[in-house]
Image (cartoon, helix red, strand yellow):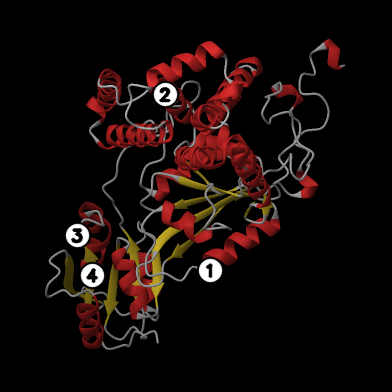
Amino acid sequence: MPQPITSSIRCSREAMDAALHRRINPDMHVRHLQVYGREASLYYAEGLCSIDFLQHYVLAPLTALRDAPLPGDVADGLKKTVCNADMLAANTMEEAVSQVLTGRAVVFVDGMDSAQGFDVRMFVRRGIAPPMTEQVVLGPHEGFNESLRDCITLIRRILPTPDLIGEMQTVGLQYPRGLCVMYLKGVADQSSLQRVKERLAGVRTDHVLSVGALQQLLEDRPYALLPQCILTERPDRAASMLLEGQIVLLLDGSSQALVLPASIWHLLHTPDDASARFQYGTFMRLIRLLGLLCALLLPGLFVAFVTFHPEALPVTLLTSILESQASVPFSIPVEAIAMLVMFNLIGEAATRVPSVVGSTLGTVSGLILGQAAVEAHLVHPLLLIVVAVASLGSYAVPDYSLGIALRIGQLLMVLAGCVFGVYGMVLFLAAGTVRLCSLTSLGSPYAAPLSPPRAHNPDGLVRGPVWLQRWRTWLAAADDRLRIGGPMRRWDRRER
C-alpha cells in the first residue's frame, strides 16, 4: 500500500533516507533548512538535476523564507516564492521518491502533510546527430537521441499542430521508465489507439530495457519470424507515419521510435523514396525486391537444381559444375550451408567491430576466405558467386529486423531444397505466403492492401507521383482517409 506523507518532518526524513538508501548511495543528497520558522528538508539526486538551477531558483528563495511569517497555506506560499521552477505536489512517499529519481528537488516542511517537488532536471545527453542505422541520401540529417524530450521536440518541429497529441505515461512496475504515445487526433484510428493503451496497461514486467523489448511485449504474434512493428531513428519518417494514421511510441533512454501498426510494405520502403522523383523511387524499390528474392531463393534454387533437377540446367553449365564438383570433397548442400553461415559470421563480425574498420573487415574477409576456399578445392566457384549475390541481396533490405528474418528464411529454403528439391521450396514458399497473409499488426492485416484488398494510394511496390497520392493509408481513421480533395497541382492545366 502507498505510504502517505505525514505532517511530522522526522518521520518523513526517516522514510526518505530509507527509501533512497542514503547511507550507501553517495549521490542522494539532503539539505536541512528553516522555512517559515519550521524545520524543512530538501532531497535531490546529484547528476539528475542542475546544481545551478537548484542553488539560484530553489535554495536561495527557500533560504529567504527562514523568518518569514507562516502563511495560511504553506504549499501556496512555496509556490509563490519559488516561481521560476514548476512545482508538483507529492502525497505519498512513493511519489516523492519517484520525483527525486526523475531529477526534481523535493521539499518537506514540518506540519505539511505533503511534499512539493520543484523541476530542476538536467540530464547528460547526446546531441542531435545523423541516424546510425538508417543512412540518409535525401532528407534531413537529424536522428533521435536518448532524451525523450528532445525526441518529442524533433517531431513537433516537423508537425507544428495542436492535433499532434503526446500522452505521457510510464511502463514497468518496479522500475518504471517514461513513455510517450504520439498520434494525430482525428487521423489515428481510435480502435488501434485504444488497443495500444490496453496493451501498455497490460505489460507486467519490472523494467523495460529498450524499445526492442517493448516491441516484443506489444506485438500480435511473438512467435512469428517477421517483425510486426517498425523501428526508426529518423524523425521525418516517424512524422510521415503519423500523417498516415499510425501511432509512434517514444521510450525515454532509447534513440529509436516504435511505430505500429505496420505492414510488410512499410518494411521495404525508405524515406528517400518519398524525397526522390517517382521514377527513381520505383526503380529503387524494384531493386530492393530483386535483392530480397535473390537472398531468399537463389542459394536454395542452386542446390535444388544441381541435386534433384540437373536436367533443367544447360548442358554446358551442368558439365562445368560436375567437373568442378569432382575435386571438392563435400556435397553441394553442405557447401551451401557452410558458405551461408560463413557470410553471416562475417556480417556479424563487421557489425560488432569499430565502425572505422568494419566495412574493410567484411570486404577483406569475404575476399580472402572465399578465394582461399576455392583454391583449396573446398567450395565450388559458382556456389561462392551465388552465396555472395544472395548476401548482397539481404543487405539491400532497408529494415534491419527484416534482413535477419530474411537470412533465417534463406537457410530454411536451402534445407527445403536439399530435402525435397524445387517442389519442397514451392511448398515452403506457399506456406510462408499464407502465414504472412494471416499475420496482423495491432489487429490490422499485415499484407494489406493486397491481402485483403484495401483502397490505397499508388504507393505500394510501385511509387506513383506525389500529386496522385490524395489518400492516407488504410490504417487511418475511416472518416479521415481522404488527405485532400481535388487536385494537388491546381496550377497545372491538365488538372483544371
For residue 9, the mark is none
- In the picture, measured across the screen, residue 213 lies left or right of residue 155, that is left
For residue 201, the mark is 1
| Amino acid bearing label 4 | Tyr
Quarter of the image for residue 467 reads: top right
Q: Is residue 92 above or below residue 247?
A: below
Residues at discs 1 and 2 in contact (Cβ within 8 Å): no
Q: In this rendering, which labeled residue sits more in front, label 1 or label 4?
A: 1
Residue 332 rendering spot, x and y as whole percentages: 42, 31
- Counting other residues with Cα less than 10 Å from the Cα at mark 3, is it few (<14), some (14-19), or many (20 or more)? some
Q: Secondary structure at mark 1?
A: helix
How far apart, in angstroms, are the residues tagged by discs 4 and 2? 67 Å
Q: Residue at position x 64%, y 52% from top?
A: 439
Residues at discs 1 and 4 in contact (Cβ within 8 Å): no
Q: Residue at position x 21%, y 87% from top?
A: 10
Q: In this rendering, which labeled residue sits more in front, label 4 or label 2?
A: 2
- Residue for badge 3: 46
Q: Secondary structure at mark 2?
A: helix
How far apart, in angstroms, are the residues tagged by discs 1 and 3? 31 Å
| Amino acid bearing label 1 | Ala
Residue 270 visible in the picture: no
How far apart, in angstroms, are the residues tagged by discs 1 and 2? 51 Å
Q: Secondary structure at mark 3?
A: loop
For residue 43, the mark is 4
- In the picture, measured across the screen, residue 132 lies left or right of residue 222, that is left
For residue 383, the mark is 2
How far apart, in angstroms, are the residues tagged by discs 4 and 3? 10 Å
| Amino acid bearing label 2 | Leu
Q: Is residue 337 above or below residue 226?
A: above
| Amino acid bearing label 3 | Glu
- Mark 3 or mark 2: whose residue is earlier in sequence: 3
